[in-house]
Each structure stands twice: as structure tokens, then as C-alpha cells.
Amino acid sequence: MITQWFFSHGDRRSLIVIAILLAIACLVPLLNLLVPDTSPLHVPTYLVSLLGKYLTYAMLAVALDLVWGFCGILSLGHGAFFALGGYAMGMYLMRQIGPRGVYADPVLPDFMVFLNWKELPWFWHGFDHFWFAALMVVLVPGALAFGFGWLAFRSRVTGVYLSIITQALTYALLLAFFRNDMGFGGNNGLTDFKDILGFNVQAGTTRSALFAATALFLALAVFVSSFIIRSKLGKVLVGVRDAESRMRFLGYRVDRYKLFVWTISAMMAGIAGALYVPQVGIINPSEFEPANSIEAVIWVAVGGRGTIVGPIIGAVLVNFGKTYFTAAFPEIWLFALGALFILVTLFLPKGILGLYGSWKTRQANRAAREDDEILPPVVKQNGTLMPTPEPQAAE
Amino acid sequence: MKAKDTLLYLDGVSVSFDGFRAINNLSLVLQSGEMRAIIGPNGAGKTTMMDIITGKTKPDTGDVYFNGTVDLTGHDEADIAMLGIGRKFQKPTVFESHTVEDNLVLALSGPRSALSALFHRQSKDEADRIHEILYTIRLFEKRHWLAANLSHGQKQWLEIGMLLAQDPKLLLVDEPVAGMTDAETAETAKLLRDIARTRSVIVVEHDMHFVRELDVKVTCLHEGSVLAEGSLDHVSNDPRVIEVYLGR
């Protein structure tokens, strides 16, 4: 009975978060657009974009949690998929500038004119259509993840070795995108965006709409993750995390399950990146930096891995902290971040949500003892499958 | 003996790791419906033999046939599991963060593709089978417990239950009673004899009381090959077996 209650409760938690996200998708734009500047309830436009940025980070964290928290694949290169989605969106936004660039070339973006290029490289074709760019936002990270995962998972690369090659992947992309010859704007990346779908990206209404879209996509990501995790496939993933070879001897093709969730996760990260770029107004190779991917891992760890909802809390909290600290005490931010990771690993192995979960379990156990009921020592905490302390130990 | 009349047929199998011959020209034949106990000192190659049968290790030379015609050396673990060979590990290996019931759900025979798992809905039939197994392994009351909270013996049973759910033709069981109490050991022997009525079983075990209780043909391995084979009395009276394994 109790477990059942926890189960429905776990489902309810995702539903509550989806409801909250839908609410702020309406509320924040309303408070920005309809409430006058003088009112204390007014949300300034800069804050709308800032919150939108946090939510794209939260979406990256949810994507990362899907592979790390539930399947034990610690990716230290998820920022690569985020950045690729961002570049796909950036290319669309560049093509929308048209003749309004500094060099006023009707087709070529400024940096290509500057490099004396005479025509558009083949891979820039199609990006003048939004639908094509939107497709690439999902397909490019998805295809890279599929190819990478197919090779890595079939060769049974796991644990820290896999983490290292994901790190190498994002570093290789960083170096490649730095090169001017690659045709993605080199060091400067893509910026000076003007329009998205015909609306001015700087306008308050557009920013509010982008925020709302981000909240909606994050809600969708939570829904999809929750659907996957609650299905039998989700149970297989947790089984792979805890005892990979057992799963194989039961007849499951572990590599295919990993590949499935890995590719879905990369696509999610790509969408997050695409929503990030119009809100911050720039995409450059620094997004591929390994440190970014590691930061994303910290968000998930702080919020609580293997909980879907926790990483959202982690991403928003850590980035609030980052915004505050980098403004107030810029020189200590990295130390604070490092200390945070160490403290969370030592004292909160299940993150903020895990802390809440174990408190709830204690309450439930106490209540049950008072009812003199026979109870298992520990039940599923809050209906989520809490990860074992060593999700990498898959043997 | 011809391979095609047997359930499991190993002939001249050898495998080396870094020059160490773990299995040396091993030949072993198991008939359909047979239960066999494998004994032997540490390092005799018992676990490596199971690795070869289940596809975890590929032999350097030799033939491994299942059901008379299927060459197991050409298949991987997942394939071999689907062909109908189940394996219980030496250390109980269950999914600790799943409930007892979910452990069985995962093991239950059925389609194994990712897509079918994503849209899987449990049928009445499957639920009935899981309940039946829960009763067989005496864990019905604990079906909502996390497997992590079971005792050692209960984990062993859960793993045996998972093998039953897999519905294999051949079960490989590695040291099922290690760390069990005497009562649990006796129960486990009974459970395995029940299982052996409908399928073939290979049991690797050190506990001679347990092997005696099973009352089946025994094979003694030593240094990667068969030292003696026959009834327990025959094997345990073999001077070479006494020399290398049982001691004087």
C-alpha cells in the first residue's frame, strides 16, 4: 500500500513540476508585458531572458540525468550536444540577417565576406528555413550521439573510460569550431542576430515568447523523461546501471538500450541549446569547453541524480549562485563551485531532492510504526529509484 | 557420442588468459533433462566453463553446441540467453534498486527490444506467472521490497526466481548455497530438484553435503579438464579426486 502511495506520489511530482512550468510559461511573460514598470510585480526584460537561460540549462541537466542518473553513463561532454543544437539555431538566425549585416551581402553572413568567401558553403544551405534549422537542431546532435554511442557501447566502453572519451569529443569539437576554415565563424562564433521567425529578437515580446517556449519544452522534457523512466524500458536502464552483465545474461541487448537513451538525451540537449542561443544572442566555440559539461554534471549532482526533477532545481540554484558570485566576488566563483561539488558528494550523495526524499521516508516509516504495520526497512524513496552510491560500478 | 542428440556438447575446448590455460581440452556432454553437479578445487575452471557456455568468453579451440546444432561460440550473451540458457552468478546478482517484483518483471521471458519495452503493458498472463514464481521462491510477502533489503539467502532465491521467469532450457547455477544456513541449503536443494523436473541444470558447488542431497551425476574438474565423472560415491572414491580436491 505504502509503496503504491509512493509510486503515485512519484508520478505526481513530475506532474506538479510540469504544472509549475506551464504556469510560469504564462505568468512571467504576463508580469513582463502587462504589469507596468513601476509596479513591484513587474519582471524586467533582462530577467526574463536570464530566467529563460536558466531553464535551458535545466533542460540540459534533465537530459544529462536521463543517461547518468538512470543508466549510469556519466557524460562529461553533454555540452557538445547543447552547443551543436545552438549552432544549428545560430545558423538560422545568421541567415535571417540577410542584407542588414555590416557588409550588406544579401546571402553571405559577415564573417564569410570578411574571409573573402564568394559563396555559401554547402552545409549552410537550407538554414534560411526555420523548419530545416529546427530539424537540424534535433538531427545533428542525435546523429553524432548515435554514431558515437554505436561505436562506444558496442565495444563495451563503460565507466570512467567512456567519461574520458566524451570529454575528448567535446574538446575535439571545441578545437574544430575555433578554426575559421570550418565555416562557423571561428573564434567569434555567430552573433548580431536580428530576427527569429520575422520577430525582432531584442523585442520584449519576442523574449517573453522565447521564455514561454523554453518553459514548455522543459515541461515536455520532464514528461518524456518520466514516461521513459516509468516504462519497462526505464526499469531496464536502471538494471543496466546497477548490474550490466546480469542484464545481458537475461537476454537484453544492453548496447541498444544505452544507445536509445543516449540519443534521446543528446536530442534533448540540442533543443536546449537551440533555445539558449536566441536568448543570450551569441553562440561561439567556448560553449564546447569541457568545463561547461562538467558544470552540468554538478547541477545534476546538486539537485539529485536519478530524480528527473532534482536536476532542474540544481541547475537553477547553481546558476543563480553563479550570476550572483561572478558579479559580487568574481575571483572566488570557481572555488565556490569546486567546494559545492565536494560538499554535495560528501554530504548529499543524493542531492537536494534525495535529502527531502529520505526525510519523507523517515516520516512515513515512523507513521507506519505507529500504525503497527509490517513495513520494509526502506521503500522506494518518493517513488523514484534512488541511485546506489556508485552508479558507475556496473558489474 | 554425437552432438546432435545432446542438450549441451563441449568437445576439446581450450582457452588461455595471458598464457595461463584456464580450460584445457575440456569435453562435457549434458543430456536433455539432466541435472549435473560440477565440483573441483579453486582455479579448476568451473566459472570459466560457464563463461564459455554463456558467451562471455570465447574459446581458443574446441566445439560448443547447444541443442545439438547451435554453435554457441558464434553468439553473444544476449543471444545465448534468448536461446534458453540462464545463468546464476556466484555472488547473488539482483537489481538492488528495483523491487522483488520488478526484478522478476525484467527477467520474464518475452520480447527484449527497446521499443517493445518502452510501450510494454503487463498482461494478466504475465502477472499470474510472476505471482506463481513469487510463491515458488517464497518471496510473495516481500514482493514490494527493494531487492537491496533482502537477506543473502533471499537474494539467492530471487536470482533463481529470475532464472525461472526467463524460462530457460538449461540453467547454470554457480555456488547457490554459499553463505546459506543449513535450513536454507536444504530448501535450495529441494527447489533445484523441483526445477530439474522440467529442465536441465548444471550446478557448480563446493558444499559436498549439498551435492549429496542433490543426488545426481557428478563431474570433477581439475586444471581445466575433467578428472572424474560418475555418481558421487564413484567420484569421491577416485584416488586422484581425493588427491587434488577432497584431501585425505
Image: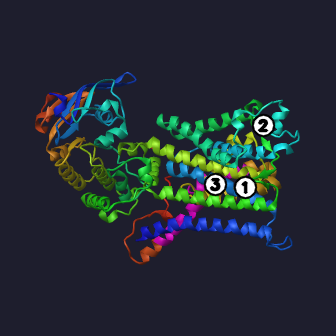
Chain at tag 3: A
Q: Quadrant of the N terminus of chain A?
A: bottom left
Whole-percent x, y for residue A176 in the image: 70, 32
Q: Main secondary structure of the magenta part?
A: helix
Residue under pointer 2: A185
Whole-percent x, y for residue A17 in the image: 60, 65
Q: Report helix, strand or loop for mark 1.
A: helix
Query: Residue flagged by tag 2: what amino acid is it?
Result: Gly
Q: Quadrant of the C terminus of chain A?
A: top left
Query: Residue flagged by tag 3: what amino acid is it?
Result: Met
Circles 1 and 3: CB distance less than 8 Å? no
Does label 1 or label 2 sit earlier along the sequence?
1
Chain at tag 2: A
Query: Residue flagged by tag 1: what amino acid is it?
Result: Lys
Q: Residue at x 19, y 29 (%)?
A: B3
Name the disc covering residue A59, or none.
3
* Left or right of residue A124: residue B2: left
Q: Report helix, strand or loop for mark 2.
A: loop
Q: Residue at x 29, y 35 (%)?
A: B53
- Within the magenta stretch, is there residue A344? yes
Q: Which residues are magenta?
A: A335-364
